[in-house]
Amino acid sequence: MSTTKLHVLYFSATGTSRKIVRAIASGMGEVDRELDLTLLKDRQQSHRFTDQDVVVVGVPVYAGRVPVLLSNYFQQLQGQDTPVVLVVVYGNRDYDDALLELKDLFETNGFRGIAAGAFVGEHSYSSKVATARPDADDLETARAFGEEIRQKLAANEHGHLLEVKGNYPYKELVAMPPMAPETNALCTNCGLCAEHCPTEAIDFNDCRQVDASSCIRCCSCVKRCPLDAKSFQHERIVGITHYLVDHFSAIRKEPETFL
Ligand SMILES: Cc1cc2nc3c(=O)[nH]c(=O)nc-3n(C[C@H](O)[C@H](O)[C@H](O)COP(=O)(O)O)c2cc1C
Ligand code: SF4
Ligand code: SF4
């Protein structure tokens, strides 16, 4: 890693993907640049990488896929035979085809997948599913995985093609009606949720006003509000959340890595 530069890229509305990519990178060496792509203002710029760079990219799984706003944005990243470590973080249900999709998105833009991983993070919709993950064990697995990647890079052992779990065609995108979180009377209009909304769907002047057509249901505002003033009341989200708690709160899925 001495002559190469290590770049960490992530989108992380509720912070779990960020923790995982940082842990993996900590096992790989010193990070030269961290690009947080969570906010709209940070997804305006294109970036180019060379074969002297190594990129670790991490995204959450949304409905078994890469979030659509990211698959669009990733077209603006261009590699030049750039080694990339591909990471998805999912909420203990399944990551379906997201890791394969992420790999394809990067490999068609000049990057070369050298390692990949699917890790678990507390579910955006409920703190009862994968509660407080990634935990210390997950982070240690991530760090140790980073060390393995560093050794692989140092040994120049990246001739073979990386294979990851996933199927073609990818899982069909789920069409959801436009919806937005509700705001209760506890809201003090402090602006925190608006500041962190990845799509600027929340009105900065009146945080009760949310543009349903821009909301991606990431739950950043719901989890971040110190007064628990925001929540999704839409029947589709309430139904999905019940299903997730019933089926995935009592089991523990473990990280999977591909080298
Ligand atoms: C719209 C949406 C769809 C999701 N779909 C899935 C899914 O298909 N499978 C799963 O296990 N978790 C799913 N999750 C949960 C997130 O992938 C998980 O909580 C992840 O840790 C969130 O990452 P972040 O903290 O970086 O935002 C979904 C979350 C959201 C907001
Ligand atoms: S973070 Fe909570 S209290 Fe602050 S503006 Fe948003 S909803 Fe209101
Ligand atoms: S308004 Fe929607 S997109 Fe914005 S933070 Fe809340 S859930 Fe996420």
Image: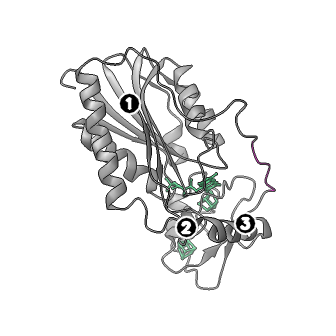
Image disc number at residue 55: 1
Going from N to C along the chain, the mark reached first, 2 or 1, is 1
Q: Are marks 2 and 3 in contact (CB under 8 Å)?
A: no
- Residue 32 visible from this viewpoint: no
Residue 192 position, x and y percent, is 49, 67
Does 187 sit above or below residue 99? below
Instruction: Kindly identify the amino acid type of the residue bearing the numbered disc 3.
Output: Ile
Q: Earlier in the sequence, mark 2 or mark 3?
A: 2
Relative to 125, say whether 38 is above or below.
Answer: above
Dot 3 corresponds to which residue? Answer: 237
**Residue 70 to residue 156: above or below:** below
Distance from the alpha carbon under mark 2 to that under mark 1: 30 Å
For marks 1 and 3 on the same chain, the one whose residue lies earlier in the sequence: 1
Location of residue 97 (image quadrant): top right
| Quadrant field for ligand 1 | bottom right
Q: Which residues are magenta?
A: 173-177
Q: Is residue 257 left or right of residue 236?
A: left
Q: Residue at x 79, y 54 (%)?
A: 176
Name which residue type carries label 1: Val
Q: Is the CB of the residue bearing disc 1 within 8 angstroms of ligand 1?
A: no
Give residue 171's quadrant in the image.
top right
